[in-house]
Image (cartoon, grey):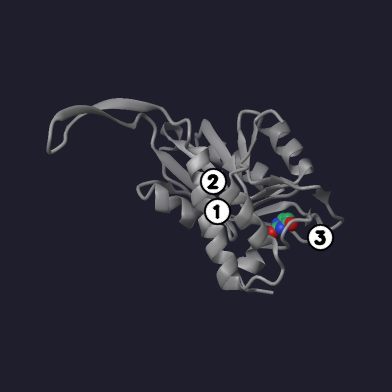
Amino acid sequence: MQGVTVVDHPLVQHKLTLIRDKKRSTKSFRELLNEIGTLLCYEVTRDLPLTDVQIETPVAPMIGKEIAGKKLVFAPILRAGLSFVEGMTTLVPSARIAHIGLYRDPATFVAVEYFFKAPTDLGERTVIVIDPMLATANTAVAAIDRIKEHGAKDIRFVCLLAAPEGIERLRGHHPDVPIWTASIDEKLDEHAYIVPGLGDAGDRAYGTK
Ligand code: URA
């Protein structure tokens, strides 16, 4: 599928099976979300451009590599994006964080915003929008709308699971935003849950159900 990368690394797929299991504890669910976040961060940053830098080891001078240009912003969609982003900041501890508070109205599934706080220079940065579940894509589309209103031009989207319907909607609204996911599941059910999915990621991560 164009613009979509399915991360099929064995560690990601193994941990994905563990986290889907309905018997998994809240503690373990959150730990796995965090760990998979780290692994997906590795993949989503794979093509960041490098530049040469002169350094000296204790033995000799050399030309090393460092990440060039734009610095990263992670933009988790609350709540479930929070445990996911923790794993990503393990790899990129200096990344800035933009918090996007959106929930989907349980009756209409429309995204409702309740919080937005981002660095002021989004236009100068690569912004990675993070939500474990790409279901209808209403929240993802709304989050990316807001990020773009604040000047971001270079945006990527990372999720744990995606429904085909969500991918189609997100790619339709924001074809410039590539997607990374650990799985494209079968479909959405009548409550807009991903099937087979893993249930409500926020409730499972924070033990609220
Ligand atoms: N949000 C979730 O947490 N789970 C789904 O299956 C769909 C949306």
Q: Residue furthest right?
A: 190
Amino acid, disc 1 = Ile
Question: Element type at marker 3?
Answer: loop
Locate the C terminus by quadrant. Answer: bottom right
Disc 1 residue crowd, few under 14, some 14–19, many 20+, Cα 10 Å? many
In contact (CB < 8 Å): disc 2 and disc 1: yes
In the picture of the structure, the residue carrying the numbered disc 2 is 40
Locate the N terminus by quadrant. Answer: top right
Foreground of the two, 9 or 178 = 9
> What is the distance, in whole Å, between disc 2 and disc 3 at their CAs?
32 Å
In the picture of the structure, the residue carrying the numbered disc 1 is 36
Disc 2 versus disc 3: nearer the observer: 2
Foreground of the two, 116 or 209 = 209
Question: Element type at marker 2?
Answer: helix
> What is the distance, in whole Å, between disc 3 and disc 1 at their CAs?
30 Å
Which of the two discs, 3 and 1, labels the residue nearer the N terminus? 1
Foreground of the two, 153 or 201 = 201
In the rendered image of this protein, does residue 24 appear above or below residue 109? below
- Pointer 1 residue Cβ closer than 8 Å to ligand 1: no
In the picture of the structure, the residue carrying the numbered disc 3 is 107
Q: Residue at x 63, y 50 (%)?
A: 13
Q: Is residue 115 visible?
A: no
Disc 3 versus disc 1: nearer the observer: 1
Q: Residue at x 62, y 37 (%)?
A: 179
Q: Which image quarter: residue 190?
A: bottom right
In contact (CB < 8 Å): disc 3 and disc 1: no
In the rendered image of this protein, does residue 157 appear above or below residue 209? above
